[in-house]
Image (tube, helix red, strand yellow):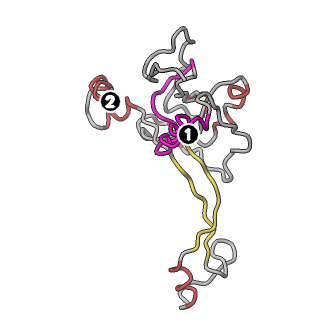
Amino acid sequence: MPKHIILTSHPAAGGKNPQPIVWGAPEAATRGPLVGTPREKRRNVIGAHNGAYALYRALAIAAGQLSPIHIPDLTNTAPVETIGPFPQWGDPAKIVSLDPWGHLVSEVFAAQLAAGWDIRPTIAVTKAHIDMPELQQAIAAGRLKPDGKILRENGSARVTKAAIEPVWYLPGIAKRFAVAESDLRRSLF
């Protein structure tokens, strides 16, 4: 493993030009992919993929259990529920702390993924059943009646869950907090 630390804020050595981003574009393909992995020469954002789980990835690599150049297989990772798009997704002033298109990476950027780009989803959407004692008690007391669709007879509820990693659009964040973008970038660095 190389000993040199590569910061994603530095341009790739001899790399390609970063993929442009049009934040607030009305569709993901027009906005462009958010590319932040250190090994990707087209990166256009900084950060750590997997949020709080980035530490576990680092531990797996340090322990020799995961290749540092591992790219996850995004086959069959399309969201199980359609979410959006909504008008505010196309307004760069409305959403500045997440990527509203983050759950559609495997669909929208399939060609880039097939070409070997390392683009990662920032939203995972799944369905689940949640067992809550409060619901079981409410059914037993007659306050709730299971409909069989959302609330089942056994008191479990069918839900759609989304795990969302933060994605910070720094020009929008700076504007919201009335600070200079350059001061914000310098403070983050």
The single residue placed furthest to the top in the displayed view is 14
Q: In which quarter of the image is the N terminus?
A: top right
Name which quarter of the figure residue 123 lies in.
top right
Relative vertical location of residue 22 with respect to residue 86 in this rendering, above or below:
above
Separation (CA) of disc 1 from disc 2: 27 Å
| SS at badge 2 | helix
Q: Which amino acid does label 2 sit on?
A: Leu
The single residue placed furthest to the front in the displayed view is 63
Judged left or right of residue 165, residue 149 is right
Q: Which mark is residue 60?
A: 1
Mark 2, residue position:
188
- Say if mark 1 contacts mark 2, CB within 8 Å: no
Judged left or right of residue 90, residue 79 is right
Residue 22, percent across and down? 51, 26
Q: Quadrant of the C terminus?
A: top left
Q: Which residue is drawn at 52% across and 20% down?
A: 2
